[in-house]
Structure formats: C-alpha cells, structure tokens
Amino acid sequence: MNLSVLIPALNEEDNIEETVRETTSIIKEIREIESYNIIVIDDHSADSTFKTVADLKEENVVCLRLSRRGGSNTALRTGLSQVSSDAALCISADGQDDLSCLKEMILKWKCGAKIVWALRRKRTNEPFIYKILAKLFYIILGRITDNNGSGIDQSRADFFLLDKLVINAVNRCGENITSLFGLLIWLGFEQDYVEYDRRVRRHGKSKWGITGSFRMVKMWIIAFSGVPLKIMMPLGLIVSISGLIFAVRISYNVYFGPSVPVGWSSIMVAILVIGGI
C-alpha cells in the first residue's frame, strides 16, 4: 500500500520532530507499506513548528502552514485534500498516539474496513467527572444523531486510518464548519477498530479544552442531527397559539378594556399573528 500520514500541529515545536521520526521508524518496519509520505499541517502556530519540520529535510516529509488558525478539523481537512495515496493515517503531534497498533489497523483495512479507529483502552490521567461527561456526551450524541449504527465507542477514539474512498467522499463534502469525526460516521462506510494504550504527552499541555469541546458539540448537532428542526416545529406552534390568544385579548381590550394609544392594538395583532405563523 501507499500511505499518507497527516499530523495537525499547533505550537508543537517540542514534540513534532520526535513524532515524525518515530512515525517514520514504525512505518519502515511494516512490509505492507511500499511507500509513504508524512504531511504536517501547521495550524498557524505561534512557535517554530513549521521551521522545525522544514529543518528535518526529509524527502518524504512536508509541512503545510495555514494562513490563519482553523482548528484540528480544518487542518485535517486541508491535509486530506492533498492525499493521493491508498490510505491516510491521521494522528496527533504530541506523541500520545502509540503507533505500535498500526500494523493491526492495516490488517483490518486489508480485510475490507474503510475506516479503522484506534480506541484507547482506558481514559487514564483524566478527572473522573471528565470521563463520565465524555461517555454521557457520546451516548446522547449517538441517540440524537442516529449514529449508533457504527458500533464504535467514540468516547475512546483518538486516531484513525482512512481508505481512499473515504478520503474522496470527505473531500466532496463542501461544508466548512463541521466535525470530521461526525462526518466519518455519517458517511456510512464499513468501520472497524483496534485498541491501544494511550501514552502521556511528551511536552507541553493539550490545546483541547472545554471551549473546543462545546464547539464540537455545537457543530456535530447542527450538522448531523434533525434536533434543531424537530424542536422548531413544536416551539413554533406554541408561539403561534400564544400569539393568537394574546391577539384576541388585545382586540377585546379595544372595546371593553382600558384605553390604549391609537393604532397600538392593530400593530400588535399584526406582529403577533405574522410572527407566530
């Protein structure tokens, strides 16, 4: 196979060189991989991430730098648009993804899986409440977005291998703001997974925080569920009925209630009826 490795990076100058070298070393030990290239996507870092990769002067390693910060999803989508290989492996730059399971992932791919996820066995080194919230979030998300069919526990998903068919499908989806994880599940290709033990971060702190989590929730629900539309119908009906009732009340007050400025009643009735509808 021909393999592309995509590594989104934001201020990872202390980690990226070691991640690239380790990835190269592991790939060279897998005989199924005939050729490879590594694409680092610098998410407009404020440090020397781009220069660090450029200084490696590796023939199979290139670095793309985004003109402005767009987040990991945008970085990965940018990298996928440059892939022409049989498959693409998407990993993080901080060294937490243990690629010792890559050979097993490739075997799953050779058996027909178009998307192969690497799921961490345990969510260690995280607060207990964060683990519970993550599990609960993905359960609820699976219910409201009808994404339970894949059978993949997304709360443990970290990195993944994509077949060329999936890459082409992702590149044909023109939405600029969406969750790549949600898109991969929604596309409906055959999926499988392997399990691995996630390592601690080599240097620095994670760039993924509460703000990013809530942004992902918003993107996922809006892009992949009918919940907003389902809420809109009963809410609109309630507002319409309330508006009509209030319009009747206003009309009644014109003749039997306290006096109001001339024209106020007709304006309010028009606003409530039209707005309610």
Image (cartoon, grey):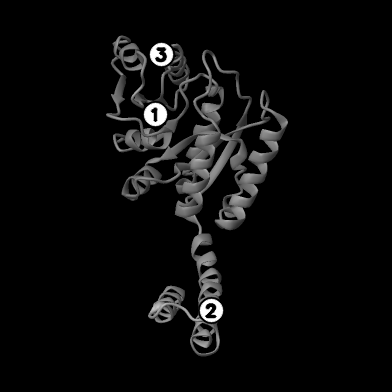
In this orientation, which residue lies closer to the viewer: 42 or 239?
239
The label nearer to you, 3 versus 1, is: 3
Single out the residue that lies furthest toward the bottom: 255
Residue 20 falls in which quadrant of the image?
Answer: top left
**Residue 80's spot in the image, x, y percent?**
34, 37
Give the mark toward the camera: 2 or 1: 2
The label on residue 13 is 3
Is residue 203 shown above or below 31?
Answer: above
Residue annotated with mark 2: 246
40 horizontally vs 277: left or right: left
Residue 70 in view, yes or no = yes
Question: Callout 3, which amino acid?
Answer: Glu
Q: Tell me which numbered mark, 3 or 2, is placed earlier along the sequence.
A: 3
Q: Mark 2 near mark 1, Cβ–Cβ under 8 Å?
A: no
Residue at x 45%, y 76% (from the top left corner) = 272
Residue at image position (46%, 75%) is 276
Q: Position of residue 1 (x, y in %)?
A: 39, 32
Q: How many marks?
A: 3
- Residue beneath disc 1: 6
Q: Residue at x 53, y 84 (%)?
A: 253
Residue 18, above or below 62: above
Task: Specify the amino acid type for callout 2.
Answer: Phe
Q: Earlier in the sequence, mark 3 or mark 1?
A: 1
Locate residue 244 relative to residue 56 in the image: left or right: right
Q: CA distance from mark 3 to mark 1?
A: 16 Å
Circle 1: residue type: Leu
Residue 96, percent from left and from top: 55, 21
Q: Position of residue 146 (x, y in %)?
A: 56, 57
